[in-house]
Amino acid sequence: MNPTIALTAPAAGSFLLAGSSVMLSASAMAVAPATIASVAFYVNGVLLSTVTAAPYQYAWTQPSGGAYSLTAMATDSVGNATTAGLSVTLIGLRADFPEFSSTQSYPDSTINYWLNVAGLMLNQSRWGTMLNTGIELYAAHNIVLEAQAAMTTAVGGIPGVSKGPVSGESIDKGSVSYDSVTASEAGAGNWNLTTYGARFIRLARMFGAGGIQVGIGYNPNPLNAGAWSGPDCTPGFTNFGS
């Protein structure tokens, strides 16, 4: 009988940072008396590595963004083989926004987290070819807020305190002020805390891109399973720009 295999990492459908190390992991089991001879990892059908002993892992680095098909093939000691696959999308945020190039200030783990959140939140069928741009702006907004929280914590402050855009502030004998009107988007709420967030909302509004509760409230409507009626509405959610 053929062995069994499963790709355990990364998660299927993940949105990850291009250029960072992505750990490919698989679990494999042979049917006795056979044993697992090897697990081979492929990307878009091209062999990356063959691992002959557990744990079956390979650190894959791909500098280019795009959609990739990952496959793991387990081969047992009598030559039977089984494959398992999944797809991921790599996002070139550091290349497109070089201001985030510092891995110390902006760790891969933080960027990967927010890229994946953005990829799950945004409606691909609505964003189309602009999806990656939307994901990057969504992630950049939250990455900046994370960095601000970390800086606040480092000096003994309380992270996560929202003060809004600065319109005027006195510091000893000096002062600082910003034009918070032109830098913000009306009705965008906390998205105005960063320029990336304001740009994200502006882009989303430009073509009515859908998302899951991105910056606007939940509209209870008991006559339609909790959502306002409309061709793009999912019960329980409200669609941005609809």
Image (cartoon, helix red, strand yellow):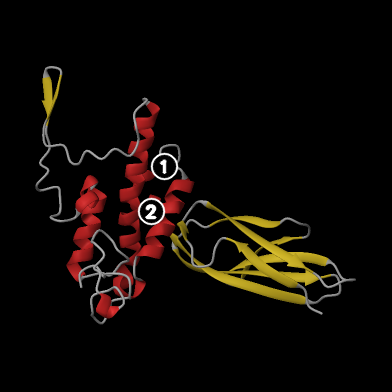
- Asked whether 67 or 219 is in front, the reply is 219
The front one of 44 and 192 is: 192
- Identify which amino acid the numbered label 2 is placed on: Leu
Amino acid type indicated by mark 1: Tyr
Q: Which residue is mark 1?
A: 106
Residue at x 83% of width, y 73% of height: 31
Q: In the rendered view, would you say 176 is above or below 24?
A: above
- Quadrant position of the C terminus in the picture: bottom left
User: Which residue appears farthest toward the top when viewing the image?
Assistant: 173
The residue at which mark 2 appears reads as 93
Q: Is residue 204 left or right of residue 6?
A: left
Give coordinates of residue 27: x percent, y percent. 70, 63
Locate residue 12, reporting x and y percent.
53, 67
Q: Residue at x 56, y 70 (%)?
A: 86
Q: Quadrant of residue 185?
A: bottom left
Residue at image position (25%, 79%) is 223
Q: Secondary structure at mark 1?
A: loop
Callout 2 secondary element: helix
Residue 210 visible within the image = yes
Tag 2–tag 1 contact (CB < 8 Å): no
Nearer the N terminus, badge 2 or badge 1?
2
Q: Residues within 10 Å of mark 1 (few under 14, many from 20)?
A: some
In which quarter of the view is residue 119 placed?
A: bottom left
Which quadrant would the N terminus be assigned to in this image? bottom right
